[in-house]
Image (spheres, helix red, strand yellow):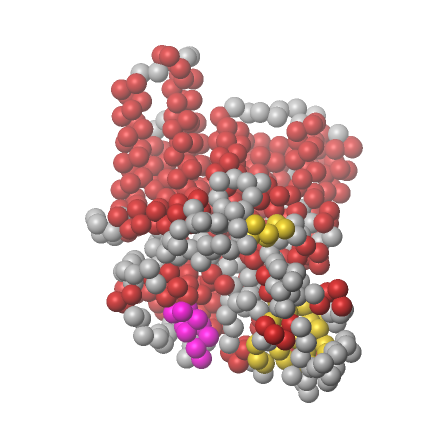
Amino acid sequence: MESPPLRFFASPWMARGAVMILILVHFTLGVTSAWIKSPTVDEYTYIATGYLYVTTSDFRLDRTHPPLIRLLIGWPLRFIPITLPPLQMEKWDTPDSYFLGYRLGWEMLLGGANDWRKILFLARLPILLLSCGLAGLVYLWGKKLYGTAGGLTSLFLYAFCPNLLAHGRLATMDLGSCFFMCLALFMLYRYTERQTTLRFLLAGMALGGALAAKVTALLLIPVYVMALVWMQASATGSLRRIPLVPFAKNTFAMGLIAWLTLLAVYGYPFKPFYYLDTLQNVLGKSFTSGRGGEAVPGMPHRNYAFYLFGRYSTEGWPYYYLAAAAVKTPLPVLLGLLLCLCYGSRRWRGLPDGLLVGTMVLLHAAAAFNRVNIGLRHVLPFYPMLYLYLGRLGELSGSRIGRRTLVLLAAWYILGNLWIYPDYLAYFNEAVGGPRQGHRYLDDSNLDWGQDFARLAAIQDAYPNEPLIIASEWYIQPGVFGLRARRMREEEIATPPSGIVAVSKHYAVRHRIFPRSPSYFNWLEQYEPVAEVGHSIWIFRFGPSSSHPNPM
């Protein structure tokens, strides 16, 4: 006998309506919160290089990533007038190319010649649309695996995920990588269902698109090979009976299709050699960073002290990404996973689970060797895969206890999303105290990526007669955001200046590395912030005495 939730969604119209509502909610949460947020650190370079890729078809500038996602970011910008600074194209093939992308982005958005809000909104829009497209893909795949209720469960988890909403509204690489990696896996899954020429071509093209989006997609190559091996072994009944020559031909043909797709994205036969530059750069900065690391172009993290749970290390931690996921994944999701593993009737579904779980394991295994520990976003594709796996939660609705448990978890999940809105980037789960305690565990793009500078205008309006001082590691032009402010000097940490001091949490974490340093940030031990902005900036208010400051 079907449970009430399954009967409710038995009507195709009800199911389609639910899908449209969830995707619309996801889009609304993303677009409204994106409008509130300032440009984040990496958006400056991705917007500038994306616009120049589209308008010049020259991909030499900042080859730290393949061009596909930046082409999507830059495409809407071609329809508005944009004043550019000198492009310095003679530097595009030099080690300075990476930093030049940032400088051009700063001038493009913060130089005063352009409307930064319009540029930022249009550049973010393609990524948000990709996120909505991925939401639809998650539903379609979940429906194939678990039926309508399972597809809606996966879509529901995706639509309200704070980590996907955080990056799904930014003009950066991470959500785009999620989309193209999941699309490639889905096309591969469809080919394993029914081997047709069209599905073979689509699987190869999707792999090429994922490779053109981000180097992380190289992890899909062993997944593709293992899936093809699995198919042949299932057809012949044994690994030993796999016909090697036909298998090799099929594998080579799919690889060739992926390579031709990569050629098409780069647009000219010799440009894919830029991909080798990108690969060298990514491997260099990921595996030779930290103590003794090489000065790789596009890698400012040599001898950089990465941060995890109050500790610093120039070498990073192999468990960094798992630890970050533990504190930034909503607790209802973790509890749902526990329910699936402990009480689910079908914990393993063969090849489909092999694709999802295998890719998630491979992603985190590769991340364990990545010494650049600056953000959970580097393993962001595991979230849509996890939500697909959790689509089987729908089977628990067959009992009254299961239904009540799922309703409670769903309500908790929605309330957690609304509670953190619009500050998704700074989300931390309740087990570690929520976003107010996030600085104790992680920094950088996990918490404070420069996303709330524009919101300081409200603080200045609240204290119009007091000077505003900003303490931040990130580049900022206060006047562009309507602020009358100056940057705080490092020596002022010891003797805080009079007025309103806005302290970026990333700045605070960066200035707590050396306790004996005169620039050691110990304000939290001495003073109480009067407010927080977006869970990423503390607001302190000091009196006129500079020698012995006291909070007002």
Residue 453 image-quadrant placement: bottom right
Q: Which residues are magenta?
A: 103-112
Q: Which quarter of the rendering shows the C terminus?
A: bottom right
Near-viewer residue (190 or 551): 551
Residue 109 part of the magenta segment: yes
Q: In the image as oriented, which residue stretches furthest toward the left?
A: 269
Q: Is residue 428 above or below residue 512?
A: above
For the point 41% across and 42% down, the residue is 217
Residue at 34% x, 63% y is 96
Q: How many marks?
A: 0
The quadrant the N terminus occupies is top right
Whole-percent x, y for residue 263 in the image: 26, 46
Is residue 284 rendered to the left or right of residue 431? left
Write down the quadrant of residue 347 in the picture: top right
Residue drawn at 49 percent across, 40 percent down: 369
Q: Is residue 22 left or right of residue 174?
A: right
